[in-house]
Amino acid sequence: MTETLDGLLRKGDHALQSGDTLVALLQFEMAHAIEPRPGLKAKLAYCLAKERRQYQQAMNLCREALQAEPDNPDHYYQLSRIYMVAGQKRHAIKSLRKGLKFKRHQPIIDELNRLGARKDPVFSSLPREHIINRSAGVLLAKLGSR
């Protein structure tokens, strides 16, 4: 039974690394039916979000993995990927930063570098989300002053 589980996990990980989330989803679902491990839950959750757009179910599954292993940065990485697929970039960045606090995790570092650093708000006395800051930032960016 464990050889089957290990084979499914290996195939699922390989498919996930190559970007084939549908194959990974199928492998992880079969492995999860055999033995629901926290690391498996987190990866399965990302595949559910990516392929089936079941964002709430995916977030809940990933949070279960985080409850079982709260200091595993890969779970935070998978949660951030779910947030990005769901269009919640702010939550994704928070999740990445929280995961980085536990341990240096190269996928988290790569993702943060890919997302890039944000510039300071135009008017520091106002919140970043304020309409004046957002409008002024867009205007200055289009003018090439920012």
Image (cartoon, helix red, strand yellow):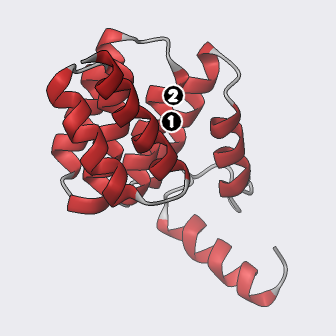
Q: CA distance from mark 2 to mark 1?
A: 5 Å
* Residue carrying label 2: 74
- Where does label 1 land, which residue? 77
In the picture, measured across the screen, residue 72 lies left or right of residue 68, that is right
Residue 86 seen in the current view: no
Quarter of the image where one finds residue 101 = top right
- What amino acid is at disc 2? Asp
Dot 2 surroundings within 10 Å: few (below 14), some, or many (20 or more)?
A: many
Q: Amino acid at mark 1?
A: Tyr
Q: Which of the numbered marks, if any, corresponds to residue 59?
A: none
Asked whether the beta carbons under mark 2 and mark 1 sit within 8 Å of each other, the answer is yes
Q: Position of residue 30 (x, y in %)?
A: 20, 37
Q: Nearer the viewer, residue 43 or 126?
A: 43
The secondary structure type at the circle numbered 2 is helix
**Residue 57 appearing in the image:** yes
Residue in view at x 59 percent, y 65 percent: 133
In this view, which residue lies farthest toward the bottom?
143
Q: Residue at x 74, y 80 (%)?
A: 140
Total tally of numbered discs in the picture = 2
Q: Residue 83: horizontal and vertical position, in percent?
A: 38, 49
Above or below — where is 133 with respect to 146? above
Give x and y (percent) for residue 32.
21, 29
The quadrant of the picture occupied by the N terminus is top left
